[in-house]
Image (spheres, grey):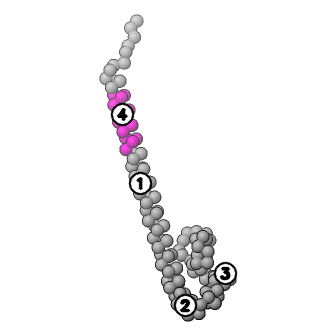
Amino acid sequence: MSTRKPSSGTHGLVIAFLCFYLRWRRVRWKQRDIHEKCDARNRRIDEVGAEIACNLVLLERLKAFAPQVAESGSSRFSAEVERLHTSPSPDAPPTNAPNPVSYDTILDDPAAA
């Protein structure tokens, strides 16, 4: 009885296939990693753009309010703070959030944003 050894050619093909497969998996992993990082970067760009748009609206509101406070002093400031607490404007930045925070709430309590 003779035992048959696998041919060295078959062994070489298996090793070549495994090397190919591992390289292919590494390339796929790198591609997925690149796409995930690109998506994260694009989401961050969108977030910063929305932040800038919101800050521009807030800046305009503060610019309009500053001369009134300069003329009337602390009484006007106190009246505006009271208005922000009691009847804030419903205007809010565009968002997909279920409960958007209004611009007036942001001015009253920046931590709410």
Quote the CA–CA distance across marks 3 and 1.
Answer: 45 Å
Mark 3 or 1: in front is 3
Residue 1 seen in render: yes
Q: Of marks 2 and 1, which one's residue comes earlier in the chain?
A: 1
Q: Name the residue under label 1.
A: 35
Q: Name the residue under label 4.
A: 19
Residue at 31% across, 23% down = 9
Camera-nearest residue between 53 and 31: 53
Answer above or below: position of 78 versus 41.
below
Camera-nearest residue between 67 and 35: 67
Residue at 38% across, 32% down = 18
Quote the CA–CA distance across marks 3 and 2.
Answer: 21 Å
Camera-nearest residue between 11 and 65: 65
Q: Of marks 3 and 4, which one's residue comes earlier in the chain?
A: 4
Mark 3 touches mark 4? (CB < 8 Å): no
Give x and y (percent) for residue 94: 53, 74
Q: Of marks 1 and 4, which one's residue comes earlier in the chain?
A: 4
Q: Of marks 3 and 1, which one's residue comes earlier in the chain?
A: 1
Magenta residues? 13-27
Q: Mark 2 points at which residue?
A: 70
Amino acid type of the residue that numbered disc 3 sits on in the rendered structure: His
